[in-house]
């Protein structure tokens, strides 16, 4: 049991609520551990939250595409218009049904194919290779673009950019 003026910590008893130097160092170290993640966090906030907030801001105005410089403030009227639209129920129902069907079919087919490919069957390796093939299309396409257009010594972008300094 400790008195009101002292605090029990793992390092011992300190008086008056002051942290020991090792506790303060542990807190600083914990904060420093998160420091390398700060650029990624800022990037995620900029890429996701700024457009989200701008969308909400823009939704509060009436925009006329024939006069793009003169938006008028609408407040929540745009939202009220959407909620009062009689076709909103149909649109929401279609969205929910389509989402549930797409996710359901994808999960069922994915699990079924995974279970089939996990059994000992003839040609399992070839089937697995055929299944992973579509995932290789984008890296191969990117490699071909780099090789044939950007790094081409005659008409490539890299050669063009380094030619003024005598490297092209």
Image: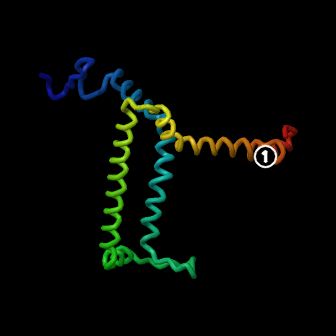
> What residue sits 32% from the left and 75% below the top?
83
Q: Looking at the image, which residue sits at the far right?
A: 166
> Circle 1 sits in a helix, a strand or a loop, which is it?
loop
136 and 62: which is toward the camera: 136
Dot 1 crowding, Cα within 10 Å, few <14, some 14–19, many 20+: some
Q: Looking at the image, which residue sits at the far front?
A: 122
Asked if residue 46 lies left or right of residue 116, the reply is: right
Asked if residue 163 lies left or right of residue 19, the reply is: right
Asked if residue 61 lies left or right of residue 155, the reply is: left
Q: Where's residue 77, x and y in %?
A: 36, 77
Classify residue 139 by image quadrant: top right
> What residue sits 63% from the left and 45% below the top?
141
20 and 118: which is toward the camera: 118
Q: How many numbered circles are shown? A: 1
Q: Quadrant of the C terminus?
A: top right
Q: Where's residue 48, x and y in %?
A: 46, 53
**Relative to 131, residue 100 above or below:** below
> What residue sits 37% from the left and 44% below the top?
110
> What residue sits 47% from the left and 47% below the top?
44
| Residue position for label 1 | 156
């Amino acid at each position: 049991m400790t008195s009101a003026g002292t605090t029990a910590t793992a390092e011992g008893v300190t008086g008056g609520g002051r942290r020991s130097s090792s506790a303060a160092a542990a807190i600083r170290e914990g904060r420093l551990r998160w420091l390398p993640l700060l650029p990624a966090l800022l990037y995620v906030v900029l890429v996701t939250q700024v457009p989200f907030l701008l969308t909400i801001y823009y939704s509060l105005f009436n925009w006329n595409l024939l006069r793009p410089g003169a938006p008028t403030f609408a407040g929540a009227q745009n939202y009220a218009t959407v909620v009062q639209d009689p076709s909103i129920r149909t649109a929401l129902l279609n969205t929910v049904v389509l989402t549930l069907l797409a996710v359901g079919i994808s999960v069922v087919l994915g699990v079924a194919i995974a279970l089939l490919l996990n059994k000992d069957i003839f040609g399992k390796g070839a089937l697995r290779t055929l299944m992973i093939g579509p995932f290789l299309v984008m890296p191969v396409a990117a490699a071909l673009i780099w090789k044939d257009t950007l790094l081409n010594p005659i008409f490539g972008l890299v050669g063009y950019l380094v030619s003024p300094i005598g490297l092209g």
